[in-house]
Image: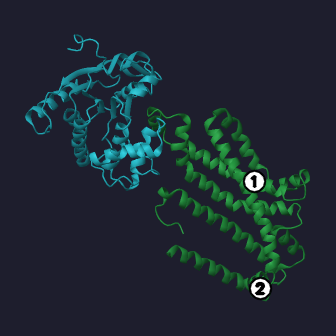
Amino acid sequence: MTRLLLAALLLGLFVLVWQGVASLESVDDLLVASPVETAEALYDEFDLLWDNALVTLVEVLLGLAVAVPLGVLLAVGMHLVRPLRDAAYPLLVASQAIPIVVLAPIFVLAFDYGIGPKIAIVALICFLPVTVNLLDGLRSVPPELLKLMRSLGASRLRSLRSVELPAALPSLFSGLKIAATVSVIGAVFGEWAGADEGLGRLVLLANNQLETPRVYAGTVLLTLMAVGLFLAVVAAERIACPWTRKEKLV
Amino acid sequence: MKAHLEAPVTEPLSLENVTRRYRGLTALAGVQLALRSGEVLAVIGPSGCGKSTLLELVAGLQEPDEGVVTVLGATSAAERRASCAYMPQRDLLLPWRDALDNAGLALECQGIRRAEARRRAAPLFERFGLAEFEHVRPAELSGGMRQRVAFLRTLLPGRPLLLLDEPFGALDSITRAAMQEWLAEALAQEPRTVLLVTHDVEEAIFLADRVAVLSPRPGRVVAQLDVQLPRPRSTTDPAFVELKRETLEALRT
């Protein structure tokens, strides 16, 4: 509870400083929107913002729906098949070293203008944290435990199901938390590379039109979207891994 | 040795001239040991003498470089694994399973469904002083309780040979003493052939019918002492103390 209060206090302080700076005589209204102006934009243009937010949310969720199963399958495959791990690991890391800003237009060119490239970009930046974290979790099971399972006559699949996967579940959730936060960034980049709807595109457009309050309002919504996804993962983790719950997280 | 006269009964366990090396280090050198049916044999030795290696060889988790390990007439690792119930030093309970599911894990590994494994594990909780702890997760159990659950997990598949690797090594001395009494009682109720590895002389004499002493690395059997004391035993009994002195002497040479 105290922690929640402290976080709220810091946020309040931030908004206060923001309002103060934006209200300064020397600060142009076109350059910086104040919290009050942002709130007004959120209220007045809610329908526009909301419709576009839904488009982006769908891109994000579909991207995650592709990335998470793919990441899980890849991690389990790499865990079980050593040559696959050795072969795929460098490629995985390389896939993240490509700047997504550069990759996005290439995807839009290669596929089309619609939702496809956005899903692909979200999936591309989300599957790595899932794969790497889950793989680390699977590999961190103490060898004595696997030895015990072997002595109990467990098959490889039984060990995976009864020991390694449950043991790696908290690691999977760590990966999902990262994926949840970066997924929104991926969708925005995807929209910037070419789109006719979505919150990312709306923000970019509003920026060009010097509709500064709308830019800020869109950014706030994008942030809330990422925070919401993160909290959803936290909630899912608390349900799925009750044994890791030592104290309340939020 | 009566066994040679009454021939056809297969010995539960025999090690003949067993040698095991790791990267140039000899862990065990020509170990010669045999267990009679229903006997509790304690193997004792200084740390690093290859005690755990010995257990893993018997359990079918390792193969000897030389010599033969025979468990109930079988020599292949897979058959040895099928006849042995191995209890490692750490309890290795799964934190996401409650005590009953942890005890039932061994049964599930044999393809028995979880619900049935729970059903079979439940009566043992009553008998071994764990009633009302069935649905508790390991994190909420004390060290001694966890070790009991681990022991039930070992016992449940009903394998004839129990292999205990310093089962109470991680416990504080008060809990350890209580657990030794508990194990002696449990074995009286549920007689098994037991190979117990420990570095605690008192534990060995308290629990075993016979104590085999291993030398420092490379481990070999340097002495075997019969423990012919009535049970329940008392560590302060003069005969006990005398036996302890003899064992310690054998350890020193």
| Drawn side of residue A64 relative to residue A146, left or right | right
Q: Where is residue B208 drawn, in percent x and y?
A: 22, 31
Q: Name the residue under label 2.
A: A40
Quadrant of the drawing holding the N terminus of chain B: top left
Residue density around tag 2, few if under 14, some if 14–19, many if 20 or more, within 10 Å: some
Tell me: residue B94, above or below residue A220: above
* 1 or 2: tag closer to the N-terminus: 2
Q: Which amino acid does label 2 sit on?
A: Glu
Q: Which amino acid does label 1 sit on?
A: Ala
Do the dots labelled 1 and 2 sit on one chain? yes
Q: Where is residue A19 drawn, in percent x and y?
A: 71, 84
Residue closer to the observer: A236 or B49? A236
Q: Is mark 1 on a helix, strand or loop?
A: helix
Q: Where is residue B234 drawn, in percent x and y?
A: 13, 39
Chain letter, disc 1 residue = A
Residue closer to the observer: A220 or B218? A220
| Drawn side of residue A239 relative to residue B46, left or right | right
Q: Do the residues labelled 1 and 2 touch (CB within 8 Å)?
A: no
Q: Which chain is cyan?
A: B
Residue depicted at x 48% and y 60%: A245
Residue closer to the observer: A44 or A87? A44
Residue depicted at x 52% and y 34%: A155
Quadrant housing residue A219:
bottom right
Q: What element carries label 2?
A: helix
Q: Chain A is drawn in which colour?
A: green
Q: Name the residue under label 1.
A: A123
Residue depicted at x 82% and y 67%: A200
